[in-house]
Image (tube, helix red, strand yellow):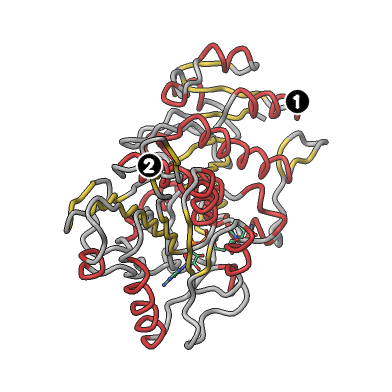
Amino acid sequence: MKIAVVKETAPGETRVAATPETVKKFIALGAEVAVEARAGQSASISDKDFEAAGASVAPRETVLAGADAILCINGPDAASLKGVKPGALLVGALDPTRRTDAIDGYAKAGLQALAMEWMPRITRAQSMDILSSQSNLAGYKAVVDGAAAYGRAFPMMMTAAGTISAARVFVMGVGVAGLQAIATARRLGAQVSATDVRSATKEQIQSLGAKPIFVENVAGIEGEGAGGYATEMSEEYQKAQAELVSSHIAKQDLVITTALIPGRPAPRLISDAQLASMRQGSVVVDLAADAGGNVEGCAAGENVQRHGVTIIGASNLSRTLAADSSALFARNLYNFLSAFWDKDQSRPVFPDDDEIVKGIRLTQGGKIVSERLAGSAS
Ligand code: NAD
């Protein structure tokens, strides 16, 4: 089994889909690993590091020739995979709903494309979940970036010249990123509060030493909901939430918003009028910027000033921690492939009826086979 690791070509991408650690692990399973030259450059991994781990390093064409599996962060253009062996696996964040032409191209090339972002949210798949591993880092970085843009200190400080009070941080949306944001802000000494529509998060917020701020008079989502994800809330809930946020937000120094609804634009959580109620110099970091934003006036990838408040439209924050995000992404890929590894055949074997395989397999045998993509067959 030859595993190829390609250099990413998407603008701004810094990550790489394998590390010396995962290369060694694949070799221990009996695989051969070939890495495209300079693939790890932006993640502080040199070609020499990959070679020392046992990989061969070569230009793209050589790496792809005869490959049985291609590991990537972002799905490459189908044209750039010309000459790849039919039946080869393509594993990474393939963005199936937006890149339908590329997925079609993978089918036509006879590849078995596996979209890691569609990993089902089940216990068995936790170690393979790229959305979680990258969100975790994004939650941390949102606080670090927010703190850097905030012109005051975070912890309470008692100095000879007087006392500085602790910053107040409010986290809206307590999924993977939100929980890490709470933990990071607490470590920096802030007074933290948080909110979500899922009642199950209340206890999680408290367990991290933060204060839950919840709509109490209108029903939210009880328990974990389908796959743990939120759904769009009723108008009545949205109104009650807006009132609650209005009274709370005016007292906050840093607000981190992370609220997402799968398949829908991000819910609007902070209006321009609410921003105007915040004190000068406050900061809002919108982690949902790429999905349309939780904050009115937010622009993905930009810092915007409104009413003296800085709105950071956080885009792909995990890329700014390239070494760590690559390490976790690479482990997710290794955990996935090794879980299906057949020792006798020295390659992964994917049962058609497996919940993970059914969830993430997009193409096979020249066709689109994903139920989720049904209707866009090649
Ligand atoms: P997400 O990125 O989809 O959304 C972020 C958060 O925003 C969620 O907590 C959501 O409830 C919240 N939200 C949505 N609309 C909101 C609104 N109007 N107001 C306030 N908050 C709102 O979430 P996520 O990080 O993907 O996590 C979702 C759940 O899935 C969590 O319970 C997580 O623990 C679970 N999970 C399970 C697995 C697994 O078992 N393999 C893996 C990852 C996550």
Measured from the top left, where is residue 180 in percent x and y? 53, 50
Q: Is residue 350 left or right of residue 235?
A: right
Which quadrant of the figure has residue 307?
A: bottom left
Depth order, front residue of 268/165: 165
Badge 1 or badge 2: first in the primary sequence? 1
Q: Residue at x 47, y 75 (%)?
A: 231
Q: Amino acid at mark 1?
A: Ala
Depth order, front residue of 185/27: 185
Per the image, the residue denoted by label 1 is: 28
Q: Which secondary structure lies at badge 1? A: helix
Measured from the top left, where is residue 285 in percent x and y? 34, 52
Q: Amino acid at mark 2?
A: Gly
Depth order, front residue of 48/254: 254
Measured from the top left, where is residue 186 in percent x and y? 52, 49
Quarter of the image that includes the C terminus: bottom left
Q: Is residue 5 left or right of residue 96?
A: right
Determine if residue 264 is in view: yes
Depth order, front residue of 122/221: 221
Q: Residue at x 51, y 46 (%)?
A: 184
Per the image, the residue denoted by label 2 is: 162
Quarter of the image that includes the N terminus: top right
Q: Which secondary structure lies at badge 2? A: strand
Q: Residue at x 38, y 45 (%)?
A: 164
| Vertical placement of residue 47 versus 243, above or below | above
Separation of residues labelled 1 and 2 (CA atoms): 59 Å
Q: Is residue 10 left or right of residue 278?
A: right
Density class for disc 2 (Cα within 10 Å; few <14, some 14-19, many ≥20) is few
Determine if residue 113 is in view: no
Are discs 1 and 2 less than 8 Å apart at CB? no
